[in-house]
């Protein structure tokens, strides 16, 4: 290829490398000298420039010619080309440094590379339910409109049962608070029952997954004082 008129230099390799003060960047900065039609030009003289208080250039190739550079898009692949110019950069400071050559701008340095992103969290194993049983609160009595004296307490059996949703539903006009609760770390859940306006025997059903247990509660017509 005969020498031609260089129009610009295209940056092809080494841009964006991080680094700290005193470090020689591992990859050279490589550009290709091009004419106005975009064809590589050999034998063209170009000038590399960088702030002296931020970087020192070395092993500089200022006359374009045949050469090679690593393909940024395909690690391990080397590209052969005409019009190659290059330089090495040793950083003087931790600042981001701009290195230029005939219209091409390289930005390097700026401190150590950022840490790699943390690995994705390992998904926790789902709970394994093996059963649901009553612990306390069955066979209670309360007058109309009164809260039953003991909470309705259930126990989940299985693995990793903490946080499992447990629902409480009642027949008739019993009120339950809360109607849906998450089991604690021991696999326990509870709800408070309040008697409605109608005397009678009512059923409260606790359910977790496919497991069910029930409580029988009695609402009396009399008040605690008349019952005693």
Image (cartoon, grey):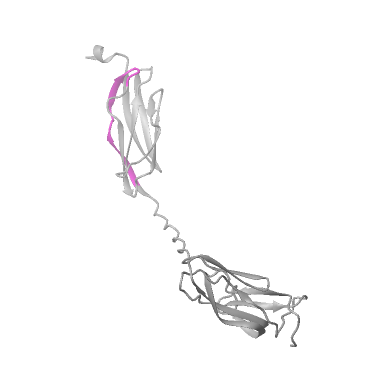
Residue 155 at x, y = what percent?
30, 40
Q: In this view, does 12 lie above or below 42?
A: above
| Residue 11 left/right relative to 2 | left
Q: Which of 175 and 55 is in front in this view?
A: 55
Q: Can residue 81 be seen in this view?
A: no
Say whether residue 7 is left or right of residue 118.
Answer: right
Name the residue located 42 percent from the left edge and 56 percent from the top edge: 123
Is 144 left or right of 60, judged from the image as shown? Answer: left
Residue at 34%, 27% (x, y): give it. 193
The picture quadrant where one finds residue 79 is bottom right
Give, as a single range, the part of the protein colored magenta. Answer: 130-146
Q: In which quarter of the image is the C terminus?
A: top left
Count of numbered circles in the view? 0
Residue 2 x/y as whole percent: 75, 88
Q: Which of 119 and 5 is in front in this view?
A: 5
The majority secondary structure of the magenta stretch comes to: strand
Q: Residue furthest right?
A: 37
Nearest the eye: 228 or 19:
19
Residue 131 part of the magenta segment: yes
Furthest-bottom residue in view?
2
Is residue 226 in sight in this rendering? Answer: yes
**Quarter location, residue 38:** bottom right
Q: Answer with left or right where residue 37 lies relative to residue 177.
A: right
Q: Is residue 157 above or below residue 32?
A: above
Please say whether residue 68 is one of the residues in the magenta stretch: no
Residue 139 locus on image (x, y percent): 28, 27
Q: Position of residue 74 (x, y in %)?
A: 59, 75
The N terminus is located in which quarter? bottom right
Outermost residue on the top side: it is 226
Residue reaching furthest to the front: 53
């Amino acid at each position: 290829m005969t020498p031609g008129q260089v129009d610009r230099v295209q940056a092809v390799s080494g841009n964006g490398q991080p680094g700290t003060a005193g470090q020689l960047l591992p990859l050279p900065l490589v550009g290709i000298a091009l004419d106005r039609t975009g064809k590589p030009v050999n034998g063209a003289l170009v000038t590399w420039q960088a702030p002296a208080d931020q970087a020192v250039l070395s092993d500089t190739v200022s006359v374009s010619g045949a050469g090679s550079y690593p393909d940024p898009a395909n690690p391990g692949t080397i590209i052969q080309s005409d019009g190659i110019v290059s330089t090495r950069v040793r950083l003087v400071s931790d600042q981001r440094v701009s290195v230029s050559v005939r219209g091409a701008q390289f930005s390097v340095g700026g401190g150590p590379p950022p840490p790699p992103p943390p690995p994705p969290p390992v998904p926790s194993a789902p709970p394994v339910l093996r059963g649901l049983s009553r612990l306390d609160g069955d066979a209670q009595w309360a007058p109309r409109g009164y809260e039953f004296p003991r909470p309705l307490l259930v126990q989940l059996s299985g693995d990793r049962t903490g946080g499992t949703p447990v629902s409480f539903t009642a027949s008739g006009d019993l009120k339950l608070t809360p109607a849906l609760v998450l089991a604690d770390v021991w696999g326990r859940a509870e709800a408070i029952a309040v008697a409605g306006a109608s005397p009678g025997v009512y059923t409260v059903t606790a359910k977790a997954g496919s497991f069910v247990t029930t409580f029988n509660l009695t609402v009396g017509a009399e008040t605690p004082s008349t019952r005693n």
